[in-house]
Every structure is written in structure tokens, then in C-alpha cells.
Amino acid sequence: MTAPVTPGFSFRTEASDGHARVGRFTTPHFDVETPTFMPVGTQGSVKGLSPAEVESTGAQIVLGNTYHLWLRPGPELIAKLGGLHGFTKWPRAMLTDSGGFQAFSLAQEGPRTAATAGKFNAGAKISEEGVVFRSHLDGSRHAMTPETSMLVQGQLGADVSMQLDECTPLSDEKVRDRAALEGAVARTTRWAKRCLDVWNRDYRHQQKALFGIVQGGTFVDLRIAHAEELAALDFDGLALGGFSVGEPIPMMYEALAEVAHRLDAERPRYLMGVGTPLDLLEGVEHGVDLFDCVLPTRNARNGQALTRFGTVNIKQARFREDPRPLDEACGCACCAGGYARAYLRHLFVAGEMLVLRLLSIHNLWTYGALMREARAAIREGRYAAFKRSWIEGWNRGVE
């Protein structure tokens, strides 16, 4: 195994309970306690919230999206204004994805229409060189190569960047063919080496880390073999990509149980784009350190609050006169501030923006609290009991 080599970065395990572990991921901007959840700031902000509000939920690291920031406002402008940290005023650690997933999933031939919206790979042309796509904003043509992804992410200047990988959705019939997945894995490794060539030459000395991405669908042997290939390269961390893209949840859990703990123990392990609180609990059990997902903020904007006792759909008429907070044990600005379910429902029905912000703060706090409590349970050797108790509460539902 090749240990991380970027100046200013380190990772160490501080406690473990089975495969679950508590770690400390040191970056130039912040010491991140793991396991932890990264709120998604797609276009340079966690939608509707200020950096201080995101920080108040316990977030230690946030994610920015390379595809969106590349297309608008452009990495040159962001670099000129101090990189993502200076541009967004986020004071803690930051990670950017490669942009590849969005290039595959949002790109299409021409501007978006009702007929093409949401189609994976609609119009994206993948080759050994990279992916050619048309912007979802205006239909303009762009080419995302491993070298381009590194250049854009280098200009964005986050603490951690991601290699360009080929992610094929399990909802697409062709990836049920093992040969197709083997091809994507092999190409991802070739792209990994091209990414590292650029990164080692231009950015590693600037205290910017690079993670590799393990692919392979739900084929455990492919995943393990790919993890070993990437562990031999000088990545600062390893991620599991290509999960939660259409496969049944039990299949994802089975693969995670076999693969996650086999990623190099000396580097942080990142499960990309996953997921629900139950998904996070499962990932932590198998040794995952970092998570991200749009779910807590996206669901908040649709009127759904996530609590220790399941979900609250604030639109429901049963909350019209309910004086209770979303979760009486919650310490977020929404619950601790005394906002009643009745008030939150009124705001949502009235179309007031405040409710979307309050629900987003609450949901991110719930995720942050879940991770804080998981770390404490691991340190005390009771993670299995903690996980079981949390799932029982979630399944019990909200009164």
C-alpha cells in the first residue's frame, strides 16, 4: 500500500469497534472527525443556508460540484476570487467531485426538455479520451477528460479533489453484463493514472489532496480487485463510486459489507452519494469514513423533515394545530428555537421560503447528530447496539 503523500494531510484511526472506526482526517483547513457527513453545496452553497448556518449543524466538510461550477461561473473566476474557500466563505474543509457523474447524467443533445430530463447518458459520448457532452444550461459542447477535470478542480482549490471515473448505472441494462462493468473498471484505472500525472505535477505541492474511485457495481470480486489496484497508487484516499444508482438496497448493503472494510485502512474511505440515515448506519458499520448526499436538503425543500423517529411530511393536515417541534430532543435552530409543527406547516402551505431553510437546518443537524452519536458509540464499543436502537426508533415512526 502507498501511504498518502500530500503535504498538510494525514489520517489516523483513533478507535474501532468491529469494522466501524473513528478517525481524524487532517486537512489544511480543518481536522475532520470521522465518520462524518458532508452536506452538498452543488453550486457553491448548501441551498438556502449561509456558511455559519451549515457550520452550526456540525458540518466539518462540504462538497462542491465541479460540473456545475465549471459551467457557471467558471473556475477562472473562482480562482481569481480566492478559490472555493474564498469565494464561498466556507471556513472548514471542502471536497469537489470530478464532474463526471453529472456530465454523464445531465448532459444531452441540446438544452433540456421534458422528454430528455433525467435520462442517464442522454447525449454524452464516452471514449478513452473522456466524455463529450452538451451543457444542460444552453446546449454548448464540452469535453471532460481526466486532464480537464484535474485542471478545473485545481483551479477550484478545494482541500480534496476526485479522479475522473466511469460510472455506469445499474438501472441501465448493459451493466448487468459483467463485461461492461469490467471495461468501466479498467478505464477508471487508466484515467486514475492520467489524473495522478497531472496532480503530481501541478497541484500536490499546493496542499491539495486527490482521491481515487473504486468501481465495479455489485460484483464484489471486481470491487476488491479494483480497490487493490488503486491502493497501489499514490491517492490520499479511496472512494466507493457507483452505488445508489439503481441497484436494490439489499444488494448495495451486501456489497458494502464485503468491500468497504477492505479499502486501505491507512487512508480515509468515502462512500459517494449515499444516502438515507439507514444507509449511513450501514456504511459506518463496514468502515466508511465520509458520506455525502443531496437527500437531507432536497427532501427539506419538498417539505420532509428527517428525525430520529422517521420522517415528518410537514404538508400533512394532521400537523395543522400541532404545537410540538419536529423532534423534542433535537438541538437545531428549528427545534431548539421552538418552532411548532403547526407554524412550519403554515409556512410551507403559504409558500414562505423560511420553512425550507428551517427544515434544511434541521435535516443537516439530524445527520450531524447521527454521526456524532455513532463516533461516541464506536469509542465506547457499543456500535451494534447503537445502530439497532436507531433503526428501531426510525421504524417506529413519528407520532
Image (cartoon, grey):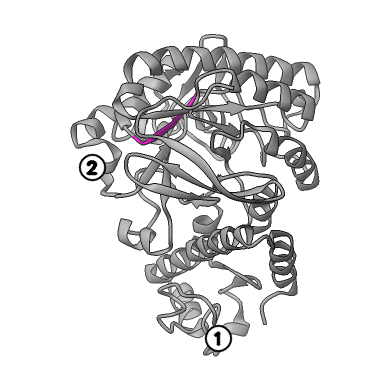
Instruction: Kindly identify the residue that appears in the image at 57 percent across and 45 percent down.
Output: 289
Q: Is residue 40 left or right of residue 176?
A: left
Tell me which numbered mark, 1 or 2, is placed earlier along the sequence: 2
**Which quadrant: the N terminus?**
top right
Crowdedness near tag 1: few (<14), some (14–19) or many (≥20) residues, C-alpha within 10 Å: some
Q: Is residue 157 left or right of residue 347?
A: left
Range of residues picked out in magenta: 158-163
Residue 314 vs residue 33, the one in the foreground: 33
Instruction: Kindly identify the residue that appears in the image at 66 percent across and 55 percent down.
Output: 281
Residue 1 magenta-highlighted = no
The quarter of the picture where residue 5 lies is: top left
State whether residue 71 appears in this view.
yes
Instruction: Kindly identify the residue that appears in the image at 44 percent across and 72 percent down.
Output: 332
Q: Position of residue 89 (x, y in %)?
A: 26, 49
Instruction: Kindly identify which residue carries mark 1.
Output: 320
Residue 186 vs residue 265, the one in the foreground: 265
Numbered disc 1: secondary structure: loop
Disc 1 marks a residue whose amino acid type is Arg
Q: Is residue 73 left or right of residue 143?
A: left
Q: Position of residue 230 (x, y in %)?
A: 60, 21
